[in-house]
Image (tube, rainbow, N blue to C red):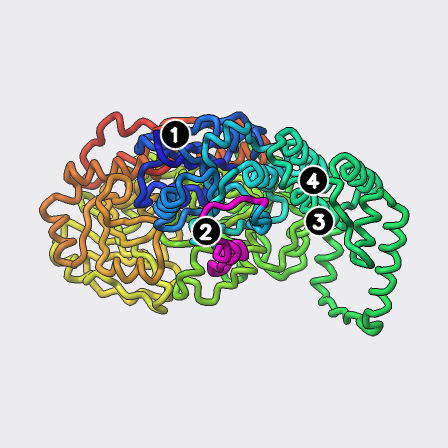
Amino acid sequence: MPRLSVIVPVRRARGQLRECLESVLTQSFTDIEVIGVDDGAPDGSGLLFDEFASRDCRVQAIHLPPGAGADGRRNAGAERALGDYLLFLEGDFVHLPGALQAVADRLDATGDPELLLFGHHRRPFRGRPRPTRSLELLGGLPEGRLTLAEHPVLLDIAPVSWNRAVRRTLHEGEKLSFGPGQHGERMYAFQTLAAAESVAVLATPCVEHRGRRRPPGADAAEPADGSAPHQLVEAYAALMEFVRDRPPLAPVRTLLFERAVQELLAGYPSVTRRRRRYVRSVAAFHRAHRPGEHRFPGGAQGLRPRLMGGGRYAALGALDTVLALRRSLRAAPGAVRARAGRSLPGHYYWWQRRLPLDGGLAVYAAYWNRGLSCNPEAIFRKARELAPQVRGVWVVSRNQVGSVPEGVDHVVPGTRRYWQVLARATYFFNNVNFPDHLVKRPGQVHVMTHHGTPLKIMGLDQQNYPAAAQGLNFDRLLQRVDRWDWSVSANPHSTEVWARAYPNAARSLESGYPRNDVLSTTPGDRITAIRRDLGVRPGQRAILYAPTHRDYETAFTSRLDLARFCEALGPESVVLVRAHYFYEGAGLPDHPSLIDVCEHPRIEELCLAADALVTDYSSVMFDYAHLDRPIVVHAPDWETYRTVRGVCFDLLSGAPGDTPGAISTTTDGLARIFLDGSWRSPENEALRAAFRARFCPYGDGRAAERVVRQVLLGETEPVVGGAGGGARAAAGAATHPAPPHPPQARVKQPPRAPP
């Protein structure tokens, strides 16, 4: 039987849950069990519980049906617990290092009290951790055993479930439980204080309370029905009945009633509906539960409590009117805001937004209006096939208009028709954010397709990496992501990272990346033609070198001596060099075995043409893995990159699922990998198989179809298919194809959380 049972009830905490669980399981104190409880929310939090349970015997997962509520999840976890003490931890929060050892030590030092209260830090959604009032109060209390009757200040410690260790015998003996609604946790906290014959305190921060962003339109932690103030009256009535039914708790009855009076009075201004009913229910609470020794404050301070306790609704309204009139007389009379003049386009855009939406119009853009490409293009072309009733219009910069294929409708930013389609379209697809001037109307649907699987830190996680976040306004970023309705994800890893990096109300669409469909469906003769057009001779081994950019560098710097590398490989190999599009010109050396493809419009075609990929930290490795061809990571500056830019996992760890193949740090070392055959060795084949299982679970060539059916056609059933062979196994006329992959690795694996 473990000493501590840590119960983690979650709802929609996918992006934060991994760190939460790791903060518990990596504690120095190990005599614990962890009980994870989810309610089947579609974000996949339950998958993480299953993952941790499969590799740590201290973890068990409980999956409840949807709608269980916070009380259902917490109570279910408590019923399964076997430890001496119950601790609750929200899936957004973490246990600080050494927390559980400190808790266990204080329990031992105080002779196993029935309740232990410990401190916490509060970390705002964007900001640094800071001490709390509760931690200050705990520091002012004696270290021995206490009771609520002797120390009423205990009621001022945050009444939550996750800052206390409750002895299981107390929980079960007193039949403690979490009640329904938004106040169930608070009442449970008060029950533990009232029922405990011995309370100990630990003035040490053990939990970091992390603020969670609630974007407009997002589900709250629990669905609210708007009757929270009315429910508070019922919750306090249940608490007073709990005390009344236990005569030994009579000494704390007045304390709890006075706390109820304070909170019910404080809740009065927030009552916007059925205010008369609220006042009457508070008066009924007073009549039923007011102790004989309770007295209202005297003078003006006690006026409102007396009116509320007496149910005098009309008198309360009159008092509110008088106070409001006094405030208005004190207000400065000359505060008149000046209105900024609108430009003509602004007027036109405003007027167009008053017209009905066009349900058959979709706007597409990619890479800041650089033309047709990436995931939006794949969705656009599939929509033409499956949903022709939805017309697509591309936003293309004026200097890129010449790249638009014939027959594709497009608009240039700033033109009259541009403002018209922004105002009237129903669907919006982009692999980056639309400009800030776009105003999202009710009924418009925004789909963020993204354009890579994250290895590097993204979004709000960049706040701790100044070099990566230079010039990024996080407030404006949050305003942009609040427009998303769908977030397309390539794999479970991306789903988890996007949920943390871009907290918003968007639904995750774990479909795979539409742009990668061609990697599974392009026929061999087309690959041969691509290689020929690029200048790859029949029989040559084509190696694609595609490094990423560094946020801390303004120009392309090759970490590879390209001329030396080409010389070492000889004329039977050709190197296709693709610098990141952020750089203007790569300044490549002149060598007959080197082909500059920096300006090639389609990275997918370059992947199809290559027999192997050499990259550093570019997300192209996740796309190329769909082809099941060798990947070599050339990473001479890994320590600098992950320190300055920040990364999500250790690419060079060599662990299955983290590293896609061979690793080099020097030009000569990279050349040896290709000369001695280790670029396609069995060991690196095994690494690639694990990498593909983690990052390419939907490589069946139907990702665009899944997005179109879900978003444009409203079909909710997923399109399921196996990992296609197609182009993955074909390398055109190359004479150095990768050896056949084991047959079992060609079967699409079921979606799972990353290892």
Circle 4: residue type: Leu
Left or right of 524? Residue 494 is right
- Mark 4 or mark 2: name the one nearer the start of the chain: 2
- Mark 4 or mark 1: name the one nearer the start of the chain: 1
Range of magenta residues: 123-149
In the rendered image, which residue does mark 1 sit on?
60
Q: Residue furthest bottom?
A: 334
x and y, in percent, of residue 232 in the image: 69, 40
Measure how far apart labels 1 and 3 are at the Cα level.
Answer: 41 Å
Which residue occupies 50% across, 31% down?
A: 171
Q: Are marks 4 and 1 in contact (CB under 8 Å)?
A: no
The image quadrant that residue 515 belongs to is top left
Q: Residue furthest left?
A: 676
Question: Label 3 neighbourhood size at 10 Å, few (<14), some (14-19), many (20+)?
Answer: few
Q: What mark, if any, has residue 232 been given in the picture?
A: 4
Question: Label 1 neighbourhood size at 10 Å, few (<14), some (14-19), many (20+)?
Answer: some
Measure how far apart labels 4 and 2 are at the Cα level.
Answer: 27 Å
Which residue occupies 31% across, 27% down?
A: 747
Q: Which structural element holds mark 4?
A: helix
Circle 3: residue type: Gln
- Mark 4 or mark 3: name the one nearer the start of the chain: 4
Q: What mark, if any, has residue 208 been given in the picture?
A: 2
Q: Which structural element holds mark 3?
A: helix
Asked if residue 144 lies in the magenta stretch, the reply is: yes
Q: Nearer the viewer, residue 31 or 557?
A: 31
- Taken as a whole, is the magenta stretch helix, strand or loop? loop
Q: Are marks 3 and 2 in contact (CB under 8 Å)?
A: no
Q: Which structural element holds mark 1?
A: strand
Circle 1: residue type: Gln
